[in-house]
């Protein structure tokens, strides 16, 4: 589905991603975990075309996409839920969702598909249907995250890139959003690459995981293995925290 | 009543009010001022597409207005082109110029975009002043013919009023349609978050250049209309001050609101006329009023108007209970 090979991305002189390679199989949930500043968001932005790579290959369904602009990549079926939600605050909920289907709205068949996708999003997140005429800025944090996910789903993606969907949300809301993500994979065979600081929640959801540290992949494996790995536990899951406190 | 019906009805009422206005103001001085309200509204509506919809600042819009006026003026006064043809050429060539400078300029954001458009406006202003052989320089360009349809010449205020407001109403209608459309939503999305608009599939770079070009073309049309109405133009009308005044109109009226652009243009055109009674202090009162409007109506006149209407309908409902 997605193969990334020897990817290098820079911000000006700063070398952010260093020879990153990873892959996703169709229908898989893959978690990318790591500390602040490890390059998780940059990796997603490189895949979606927002921050183009300097070298390396991003191949989506066998097609090299590393040099394509973001709107072309969306058109191929890759949608991103950006970090910090970034819903369009002055626009009402339904306008936000329709923007997610911006490319579909170009022609008639697309419009029909967008209508179906809108129904699907309202079924997944009934609260959005209740608030369809409300400006997005008036929603709660959790509702805005649901809207951001819903907006990405409006394009009918086959690959969904999720950037920190749990950020700043209550545990119950996070569960609700993760439940929807799981159902997407089960019912619509969507493939998911999820970036999280909440490593435990992400690994519980995912099939496989990668650990990114200062721009390099330092570990990969089945999510269940990573969950019990002592190094991962120490660095990202809070193992041994007690002793550190006591010392 | 559906939203679409309310939109059409509101526009028809507005258009009707504009079209009967001359019957109440037979006085030629006021009529002349209303002609200017029309031109300024057209310009504010054009700038609102860029500033209010897409959230991109331009401090050089007077240059596009000036390019329209001067291309029309020079072609007709010095080279006897047909005014309508000159107007078309002015609009197209200004559009091409905006399209070409749009690509590098619109990569910039915020203050940097303000500086770049400011620089463009100043360059064009200097060209108007210095190319004396072509434009007449600071002393201006006289002898621009009126527009005419066959034997019918737009040679007085009442005729020009209807001519200009026909264009202005058309531009307003196009803006209103654009606002609710797919492209309008995308523009408003760019206004709020460019990154999110890009990951939603919007080609942000192209769309910004397109709306910049459209805004410039409408401004150039306003310039041509101005030149053919006044029959005389000079660089002073197209300087930095006027660019700032246009931005003020859009903000005072309410960013993103088409009727707000009209209100802003009307207030800024009419106020100086009414403030004459304050003699030398008029500029102080003018500034004070602008500050008060922005302080108490952060959404501009259109926002304030909407809040007042909502309050009124709420209190009426409570009265009925």
Image: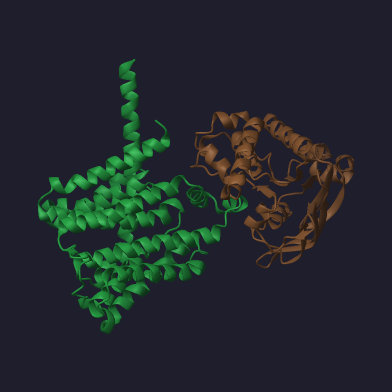
Chain colours: A brown, B green
Q: Position of residue B297 (x, y in %)?
A: 34, 42
Please state which of residues A113 and A231 is positioned toward the viewer in this rendering: A113
Q: Classify A50 as above or below B295.
A: below
Please state which of residues A199 and B51 is positioned toward the viewer in this rendering: B51
Q: Residue at x 63, y 42 (%)?
A: A113
Q: Quadrant of residue B81?
A: bottom left
Lateral position of residue B51 relative to residue A26, left or right: left
Asked whether residue B218 appears in the rendered view, the answer is yes
Q: Position of residue A171 (x, y in %)?
A: 70, 31
Please state which of residues A27 and B301 is positioned toward the viewer in this rendering: A27
Asked whether residue A247 appears in the rendered view, the answer is no
Q: Classify B207 as above or below A182.
A: below
Considering the image in quadrants, where does the C terminus of chain A appear? top right
Please state which of residues B134 and B286 is positioned toward the viewer in this rendering: B134
Q: Residue at x 10, y 50 (%)?
A: B26
Q: Position of residue B102 (x, y in %)?
A: 47, 67
Q: Classify A7 as above or below A36.
A: below
Q: Residue furthest left?
A: B27
Lateral position of residue B12 relative to residue A163, left or right: left
Q: Quadrant of residue A237?
A: top right
């Amino acid at each position: 589905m997605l193969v990334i090979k020897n990817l290098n991305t820079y911000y000006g002189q700063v070398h952010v991603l260093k020879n990153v390679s990873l892959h996703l199989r169709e229908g898989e949930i893959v978690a990318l975990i790591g500390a602040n500043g490890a390059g998780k968001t940059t990796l997603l932005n490189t895949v979606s075309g927002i921050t183009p790579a300097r070298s390396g290959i991003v191949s989506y369904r066998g097609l090299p996409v590393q040099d394509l602009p973001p709107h072309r990549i969306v058109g191929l079926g890759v949608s991103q839920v950006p970090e910090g939600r970034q819903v369009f605050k002055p626009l009402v909920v339904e306008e936000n969702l329709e923007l997610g289907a911006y490319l579909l709205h170009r022609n008639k068949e697309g419009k029909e598909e967008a209508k179906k996708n809108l129904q699907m999003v309202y079924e997944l997140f009934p609260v959005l249907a209740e608030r369809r005429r409300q400006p997005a800025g008036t929603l709660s944090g959790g509702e805005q995250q649901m809207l951001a996910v819903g907006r990405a789903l409006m394009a009918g993606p086959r690959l969904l890139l999720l950037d920190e969907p749990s950020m700043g949300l209550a545990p119950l809301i996070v569960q609700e959003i993760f439940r929807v993500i799981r159902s997407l994979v089960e019912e619509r065979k969507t493939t998911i690459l999820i970036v999280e600081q909440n490593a435990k929640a992400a690994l519980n959801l995912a099939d496989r995981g990668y650990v990114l540290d200062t721009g390099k992949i330092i570990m990969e494996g089945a999510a269940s293995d990573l969950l019990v790995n002592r190094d991962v536990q120490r660095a990202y899951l809070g193992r041994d925290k007690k002793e550190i406190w006591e010392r | 009543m559906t939203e679409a019906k309310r939109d059409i009805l509101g526009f028809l009422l507005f258009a009707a009010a504009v079209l009967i206005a001359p019957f109440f103001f037979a006085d030629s001085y006021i009529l002349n001022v209303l002609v200017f309200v029309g031109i300024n509204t057209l310009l504010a509506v054009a700038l609102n597409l860029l500033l209010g919809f897409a959230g991109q600042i331009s401090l050089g819009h007077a240059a596009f207005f000036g390019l329209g006026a001067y291309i029309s003026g020079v072609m007709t006064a010095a080279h006897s082109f047909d005014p309508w043809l000159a107007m078309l050429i002015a609009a197209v060539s200004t559009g091409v110029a905006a399209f070409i400078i749009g690509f590098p300029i619109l990569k910039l954001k915020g203050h940097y975009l303000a500086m770049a458009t400011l620089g463009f406006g100043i360059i064009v202003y200097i060209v108007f002043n210095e190319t004396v052989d072509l434009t007449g320089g600071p002393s201006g360009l006289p002898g621009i013919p009126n527009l005419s349809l066959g034997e019918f010449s737009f040679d007085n205020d009442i005729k020009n009023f209807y001519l200009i407001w026909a264009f202005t109403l058309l531009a307003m209608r196009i803006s209103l349609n654009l606002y609710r459309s797919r492209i309008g939503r995308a523009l408003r999305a760019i206004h709020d978050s460019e990154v999110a608009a890009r990951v939603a599939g919007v080609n942000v770079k192209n769309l910004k250049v397109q709306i910049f070009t459209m805004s410039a073309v409408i401004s150039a049309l306003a310039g041509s209309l101005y030149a053919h109405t006044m029959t005389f133009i000079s660089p002073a009308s197209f300087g930095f001050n006027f660019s700032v005044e246009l931005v003020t109109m859009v903000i005072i009226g309410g960013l993103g609101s088409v009727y707000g652009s009209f209100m802003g243009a009307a207030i800024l055109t009419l106020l100086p006329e009414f403030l004459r009674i304050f003699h030398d202090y008029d500029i102080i009162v003018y500034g004070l009023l602008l500050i008060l409007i922005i302080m108490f109506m952060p959404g501009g006149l259109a926002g304030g108007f909407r809040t007042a209407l909502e309050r009124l309908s709420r209190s009426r409902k409570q009265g009925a209970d």
